[in-house]
Image (cartoon, rainbow, N blue to C red):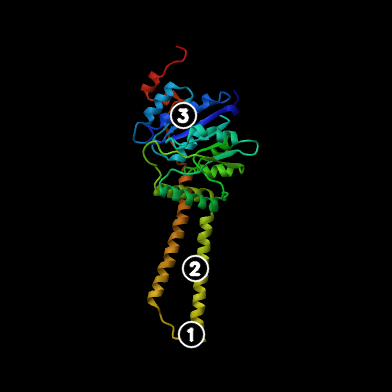
Amino acid sequence: MTQDHLVSCVIPCYHSEHTLPQVVRDIQAVFATRPDYDYEIILVNDNPPDATWQVIETMVRENPRIHGICFSRNFGQHAALMAGYRHVRGGIVVSLDDDGQNPPSEMFRLIDAMDETHDLVYANYTEKHHSHIRNLGSRLTNRMFSWMLGKPKDLYLASYYAARRFVIDEMVRCESPFPFVDGLALRSTTHYLNVPMDHLDRAEGKSGYTLSGLFRLWTNAFTSFSVKPLRIATFTGCVSSVSGVLLGLILILRKLILRDDVDAGWTSLMAMMLILSGILMMMLGLIGEYVGRIFVTMNRSPQYVIKYDSAREEMLPSSFKTSRKDPET
């Protein structure tokens, strides 16, 4: 079996102790129908406060194709994906969620769509089974990414996608503590495609993405891959300055030529000062965000920290090492 026929499935895991086993069983069932492909499953536990890691441990013991990674604390979905990508061996890498909304049965629709022209294939859901707030956030995110990152407007960035290995190898070169996988993928290739696909209901629980989580995602995307926010700040400052100069000229003309009595306008003056001060503070905060991220990166803050890794038994709990069976016995 060549590397091109080995598929690496990377799944970030958070609060999925009840849903993850079914997702893994569905993946196994799919590859049972495609004997021309082999597979591995890399489960990255993002350290949720539940029994997700214990479930992963059990699956690793039972199936040598499953590889488990556990973070020392919560680092986020994108850091979990980056950790999984650094452990893949296959020539094709598929990313999917742990909640069952990305149907594994549709996986080969993504894989088969990759040809000599397309290196990255995203699912495009005909109807998304998210909350209204999540759907609104998703639409805003895609529009903002089109403007900020140069993403084609007709390309939908889903968490369910298949990529060629060279795209993943280029992505994992990023060592920033603020990874954004979609930006890394779009930076690695321009040969991408959307494939229509069903979006299933969540088997259990609710999405871990909140408004604050989406805001952090946007911040990562903009400050890691675009200087357009700084250009907006510069443009806004120029517009404010030009407006102030024009307003001053108008007042001078009214006083010298039209002989108008110019009102001091304390209220309007204070309102203008508050507006301009607010704009300046936002600009400073934006610059501070960039500088702060540079500072954190220069301090070599980790992208993630792996506590346990099933490929390195010396890092595993003693209970896991002693209970793992030797295949020769």
Quadrant holding the N terminus: top right
Q: Residue at x 51, y 49 (%)?
A: 142
Near-viewer residue (138 or 109): 109
Q: Residue at x 53, y 55 (%)?
A: 228
Residue at numbered disc 2: 240
- Give residue 261's position: percent from left, percent from top: 44, 86
Q: Is residue 133 left or right of residue 154?
A: left
Kind of residue sitting beneath label 2? Ser
Near-viewer residue (173 or 258): 258
Q: Against 31, is 171 above or below?
A: below
Near-viewer residue (315 or 253): 253
- Give residue 327's position: percent from left, percent from top: 46, 15
Q: In this view, does 26 lie to the left or right of 154?
A: left
Instruction: Pick whichever of labels 3 and 1 is earlier in the sequence.
Output: 3
- Give residue 114's position: percent from left, percent from top: 60, 36
Q: Identify the residue at the far bottom of this view.
A: 259
Quadrant holding the C terminus: top left
Kind of residue sitting beneath label 3? Asp
Q: Residues within 10 Å of mark 2 (few under 14, many from 20)?
A: some
Residue at numbered disc 1: 255
- Determine the CA span between mark 3 and mark 1: 79 Å
Instruction: Pick whichever of labels 2 and 3 is earlier in the sequence.
Output: 3
Callout 3: SS: helix
Q: Do the residues labelled 3 and 1 touch (CB within 8 Å)?
A: no
Q: Against 104, is 288 above or below?
A: below
Q: Do the residues labelled 2 and 3 touch (CB within 8 Å)?
A: no
Disc number placed over residue 26 in the picture, else none: 3
